Image (cartoon, rainbow, N blue to C red):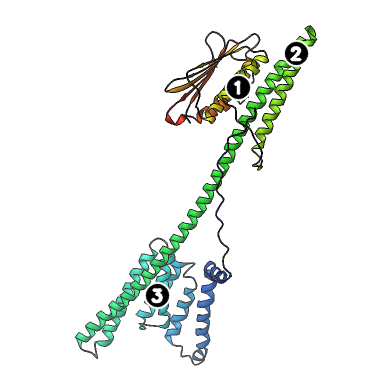
Amino acid sequence: MTMPLPSRGTIDPEPVDPPPSRLDAPFRWLASHPQIVDATVFGSIAAVLMLGSIPLVSTLSVDAWLFWSIPMFVAGAFLRTRTGWATLLIAVLAVAHFLGGYPVVLGDVMIFYALYCATVHGRGRVPTFALVAGVIGAGMQAVATTFAMLSSEPWYFVTVSSVVFFVFGTALVLAVWATGRYQRVRVDQLRMAREAAAQAVREREQRTRLAVADERARIAREMHDVVAHSLSVIIAQADGGRFIASQDPSAAADVLGTVGQTGRRALADMRSLLGVLRNDESQDLGPQPGLESLGELVEQVRAAGLPVDLVREGDVDGLPGPMGLTLYRVVQEALTNVMKHAGPDVSARVLLRRDPHQLALDVTDDGQGVDPASDGLGHGLTGMRERVNLFRGTLHTGPLPDRGFRVSVRIPLDGRTTR
């Protein structure tokens, strides 16, 4: 009789992303180093403007558009890293040169880039303030155009031109803002996709750890059941063998035969149990024990010197294999505890009963109840409870009122419990 663990479902391997193309490497670097890129681009523009202004400086006739444009381009180098402060600086410079009598300078192109960066990278209310400031700027330019044409053009032409200028400026601002919003949505989607992928990896790793822990707990239960029961039988036979050998040496051979048979069976069970840890699919692990093996288990315990009665009530055939294995293990552990803790001159009774609603198993003995010499560090009752819980069942253990100990299992039955 060999007893492997039931097979478990395999864990799906993690999907492997294709390696990035070599052509994508420069673009990935540019996207991951915005400060270096912006500092290089806008710093170069500012440097070119400064070099171009050297002849003008020598003649002390520096144009205003250079005076205002150079700091606006320098501020552009920080729009993607210090978005709020850089946008505010460009807005202040734009208002300052407007109020200083210079409605338009070359650096005003940074206003639209600032609006775009504020919409894409700005936090809090920065995008909203940038949009409002852009619309106000368009209105200020329309007003400046109106005053510039009042002295030379008819009032209706000035009015129409101002409205057209305001509408065109506002439309341009809204177009830049809409482009920034679209890019921000794409950035947010990519961020959420990365977070979802990272969360999926963490959940997969957690499921893997839980599956490994569950498998280890199952193996520990099986090891405990096999080793504890077999060693208990061998110890009982060895203790009795010493007495029999002194009284009837010829009968000691039967005891030694039982010890050897039990040891060989335990060794075969251990090999079968450990076989599930290997990847050799061709290995024959043998059938699992079930209710049909209860008779053999009871005979083995009787041979060890413990009188046991096995009573079946109702039709217990047709139960699923895992449920039969669970009941077999509960009986095995309960009888092992009787041999270890119930004391001398005891007997046990195994009652397996099935009715339309539940499956009942009671293992009782007439021993001393609770063993005062037990340290309480065993895992037998815990393993039984874990097995029974898999089938939504209950396990109750404890001493009887007069004498003895009882292990009681109740498993509800429904249409899914039959093959």
At mark 3, the secondary structure is helix
At mark 2, the secondary structure is helix
Local crowd size for mark 1, using a 10 Å CA cut-off: few (<14), some (14–19), many (≥20)? many
At label 1, which amino acid type do we have? Gln
Residue 419, above or below 199: above
Q: Residue at x 38, y 80 (%)?
A: 97
Query: Considering only order in the chain, which callout, 3 or 2, is on the residue closer to the N terminus?
Result: 3
Residue 124, above or below 296: below
Residue 240 position in % (x across, y down): 73, 12
User: Does residue 354 appear to the left or right of 165 in the view shown?
Assistant: right
At label 2, which amino acid type do we have? Gly
Q: Residue at x 46, y 90 (%)?
A: 61
From mark 2 to mark 3, how far is it between C-alphas? 99 Å
Query: Considering only order in the chain, which callout, 2 or 1, is on the residue closer to the N terminus?
Result: 2
Local crowd size for mark 2, using a 10 Å CA cut-off: few (<14), some (14–19), many (≥20)? many
From mark 1 to mark 3, how far is it between C-alphas? 81 Å
Answer with the quarter of the image where residue 306 lies: top right
Which disc, if any, is residue 112?
A: 3
Please indicate, yes or no, whether residue 49 appears anywhere in the rendered image. Answer: yes
Residue 91 position in % (x across, y down): 39, 73
Answer with the quarter of the image where residue 149 lies: bottom left
Q: Camera-side residue: 350 or 41? A: 350
Name the residue beneath numbered marker 1.
332
At label 3, which amino acid type do we have? Phe
Which disc, if any, is residue 316?
A: none
Q: Nearer the viewer, mark 2 or mark 3?
A: 2
Name the residue beneath numbered marker 2.
241
At mark 1, the secondary structure is helix
Residue 411 position in % (x across, y down): 47, 25
User: Does residue 219 appear to the left or right of 202 in the view shown?
Assistant: right
